[in-house]
Amino acid sequence: GYSYLINEGAFFTKDIVSKGLRIANIQYAEKGVLWFNVNSSGKSGHGSVPTPDYAVIKLLNFIDALQSHFSKRMISDEMQMMFHQIGKKTSGVKGFVLKRTHIPLFQNLLKETLNKSKHLNAMTKNTVSITGLSTIDSLGMNVIGSQASAKIDMRILPSFRADDVENKVREIAAKTGVSIEVVQKTDATKSELNSRFFNSLAVVSQSLIKGSTPSPLMSQGATDSLYFRKLGLNCYGFV
């Protein structure tokens, strides 16, 4: 039978973490997904006399609480492997720190570096993106509508189960008086890191870009590898 699959997800980067260092990123893991709709309802009224719990306010309170709860940065085992590989090719204090990101103190020292890159920022958090907002558009500017809704795209780190994240989202929803409807939910997936095939891809990447450093990558987005990993295949992003 088949054991390995090459898919999208690889890319070369330069100067992302260490100045002048070229990285050949080989995707072997990806974050989980939780997509859901949020619905809020409340009393309609006039804009000149707002109540403290009308639909839009409850929706905004939910979004604020959701983002606050999931704002903590966490360097997962998958990211620690990536930083360690980069650290071996980085001199000085930064290289020392990169090889020790399992230590909380050193994680804090990387805060500025991580904040400068939207990709690294997303790889070290459970992200919450608001991809849609709507109310009853036909109402006038001075009318408080009785309905409001939002679309939320969450990407989940491998150390979290999608079911547990959903339960927390529902808990926050109950406290803020809104309801949610899950559209898609998948756990994070990953393949073997020390397989012969991964090592072969690392050698090939170095021959394609001279002087580059191969590094395991956990992508913040999902690919079709999600489905093939569930079938038992080791999937690697190299396209």
Image (cartoon, rainbow, N blue to C red):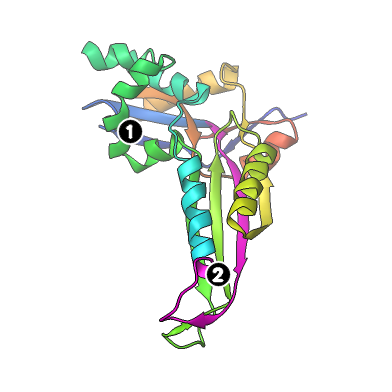
Residue 101: x and y, percent? 40, 17
In depth, the one of 132 and 209 nearer the eye is: 132
Q: Is residue 190 above or below residue 33?
A: above
In depth, the one of 131 and 57 nearer the eye is: 57
Residue corresponding to mark 2: 55
- The disc at residue 114 is 1
Looking at the image, can residue 211 be seen?
Answer: no
Residue 7: x and y, percent? 57, 40
Picture residue at 44% right of the left edge, 34% below the top:
72
In depth, the one of 64 and 24 nearer the eye is: 64
Q: Secondary structure at mark 2?
A: helix
Looking at the image, can residue 113 be seen?
Answer: yes
Span shown in magenta: 28-56
Mark found first going from the N terminus, 2 or 1: 2
Is 214 on the left-hand or right-hand side of 211?
right
Picture residue at 21% right of the left edge, 27% below the top:
19
